[in-house]
Image (cartoon, coloured by chain):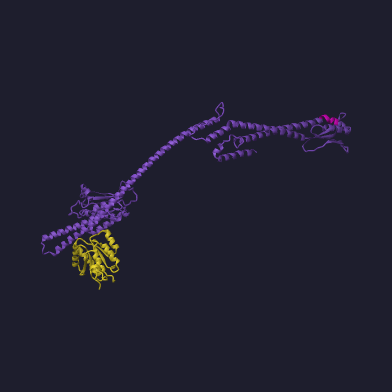
Chain colours: A yellow, B purple
Amino acid sequence: MSSQTILLVEDNPDDVELTLLAFRRSRMANEILVAWNGEEALDYLFATGQYVSRDVNDPPALVLLDLKLPGLGGLDVLRRIREHPVTRRVPVVILTTSDDEQDIVNGYNLGVNSYIRKPVDFSSFVGVVDQLGLYWLVVNTRSPV
Amino acid sequence: MDTAGDVIPAEHDAVAATRPRPTLAAGTGGFRPFSRGIGLRLLTLIILFSSLVTLLSTLSQLYIDYHRDVSDIERRLEEIERTNLDSLASSLWHVDTDQLRVQLDGLLRLPDVEMLEVRETVGSVANPLVVTVGGSHGTSVIERTYPIIYDDRGTPRPIGMLHVSATLEGVYRRLLERGVVILVTQGVKTFLVSLFILYIVHRLVTRHLVAIAEFLGEFTLHAGEALVLRRRRPPARDELDQMVDAFNDMRGNLARAYHDLREANRALVRDNEARRRAEEEVTRLNAVLEQRVRQRTAELEAANAELSSFAYSVSHDLRAPLRRIEGFGQMLQEGYVEIIDDKGRHYIERIRAGTREMAEMIDSFLKLSRSTRGELTVEPLDLSAMAADAVAKLREKDPDRSVGATIAPAVTVEGDRKLMAVVLSNLLENAWKYTRRADAAAIAFGVESRAGRPVYFVRDNGAGFDMAFVDRLFIPFHRLHKAEDFEGIGIGLATVQRIIARHGGRVWAEGEPGQGATFYFTCWEGREPGEQPNDPAGRG
């Protein structure tokens, strides 16, 4: 049984809290691991730095990726994920406030699985989180390797 | 001979014509009458003609002489008949052969007589008497035969025939001698006269022609001297004088024409110089202008880049805190229901409504900003179909309303598909919205021609507006109607204006409160009708 962990890459604590609240309200009970910046996310994924003891061959079930991150940007993280053989097939969903056309196009060019713009209205956001969790973790069939 | 005489000068002319002119005039060695010039041809022709005349006159002279000589001979023969026949008849009657022979020998001595024969013609004599002197040698002879009649006591008795033969050879010889003498003397005379004529022609004409030719050969417009012939003045002006005068006139005219030409040329050079300077000035100004355009473009691009990053910032950074306010507000509202009283819940609700409205404004603002950015992709568009699509979407969204829509067929324009769709949907959405309270709502899309240019319009019979405030219609976030009457934040028309401006056109509105409104727009106004448009802003 592979990991059911969701990796949330988000730098703002308020947004992390709101996202965690939304997940709590939804039907998802998966463990959510927060990476506060791009570097930490890559450490987790490739089992380096503070996550050196982690099994590198056990990638998360879903990566939720903010674009605007301090230091390494969300799209850079995405590129590294897609370049690595272990994480190449991990579902990645961009979850951001930006709806800039260039961001959307670049995200898909780098192989993102979904692009979601966080609605301002919290109830709507809960609905979005519920749907995406249900889809990617239940409905969708993951790659076996 | 005549034909040959005609052919030679003709050939000569042909050769002269192909030769370069100076060769003909280059008589530097002076005049040579027998060179292949007019002199030789003149001499040849005079000799030919004169010889012909001499020949003809000689022939007629000889002809006359010939006839005279022949008549002389005939007269001599008749003389023989008249004076000698009687004595011959007597000698023959007496059969005196010796006497006959003596008589005939005497006659034979007459000039040109070459043979005489007397033949007896008495029929019964078996062996008639025949006495012959001389002998016939040639074929050119005059022969006569006379009967010899003896007067036998009053009775004439023919007793024989006298045959006389005279040769013409003497005549011919004399004619030949005479002919030769005439021809030789005439020939010498002709030659001398020809030489004289040749000399006269040379004196009077040819040498002057050569002089003129030499003058012309060295002639330039700047040489000051006029053409003057060195000769004794004839008593009256002759053809050469006319020619010299004509040439000197022409020389003056040429000089004047050359002078005029040079003046014109100078003027042309001055013109060219002025034009060149003007072109240089234009080039310089163009360069300055281009430099300015480049500078402005760079400034514009920098401003646009700044605007883009600003818009991105608004999109991302302004929205994120709003989300937090809204999200935590809801948490407060839901999780602390018992602690917060009704008034507190009302305040929280107002906070959340404010954030939602602000989020909506940010989104609209972003839409407006995007309508002025990015490349235009200009292509032929079927506005009628696009308007029909927009109306269909409105009906789908608001199925309860009954709005009559009239869309003119085959309305086309060159433009960016996405942006023009925004224009049409914004204008039609407005029309749709503001006819909500009309009795029989009707909206229309079409095109009319003003000053030969297409003007597109969207018309409705809805709430309309006061023309006093028409300028505010297109200002972002300005609204002419109260929010309670018609929802919206006032960004649609501003967006339309930006897009139409990028299509080189204008947008304006006409209306009256309660009487509906009409929104007009044009495209590519700066261009000639039919000209291919291109993106005026490039990177807007």
Q: Nearer the viewer, residue B393 or B249?
A: B249
Percent of width and height locating residue A33? 21, 67
Residue B348 rendering spot, x and y as whole percentages: 14, 60
Which residue is at the front of the view, A49 or B340? A49
Q: Residue furthest bottom?
A: A1
Q: Quadrant of residue B50?
A: top right
Q: Nearer the viewer, residue B353 or B220?
A: B220
Q: How many badges with numbers are in the image?
A: 0
Question: On the rendered structure, is B90 left or right of A6?
Answer: right
The dominant secondary structure in magenta is helix
- Part of the protein shown in magenta: B82-88
Does residue B276 appear anywhere in the picture? Answer: yes
Specify the quadrant of the image occupied by residue A57.
Answer: bottom left
- The spot of residue B362 in percent (x, y) is 21, 56
Can see residue B3? no
Q: Is residue A62 left or right of residue B143?
A: left
Q: Is residue B84 magenta?
A: yes
- Left/right of residue B483 with respect to residue B131 in the rendered view: left
Residue A55 position within the rendered picture, expressed as x and y whole percent measured from the top left: 25, 71
Question: Which quarter of the rendering shows the N terminus of chain B?
Answer: top right
The outermost residue toward the top is B235
Instruction: State the residue at coordinates (71%, 34%).
Output: B180
Q: Is residue B449 magenta?
A: no
Query: Residue at (44%, 36%) from the top-left corner?
Result: B262
Location of residue A76 by image quarter: bottom left
Instruction: Identify which residue, B243 or B413, lies in the foreground.
Output: B243
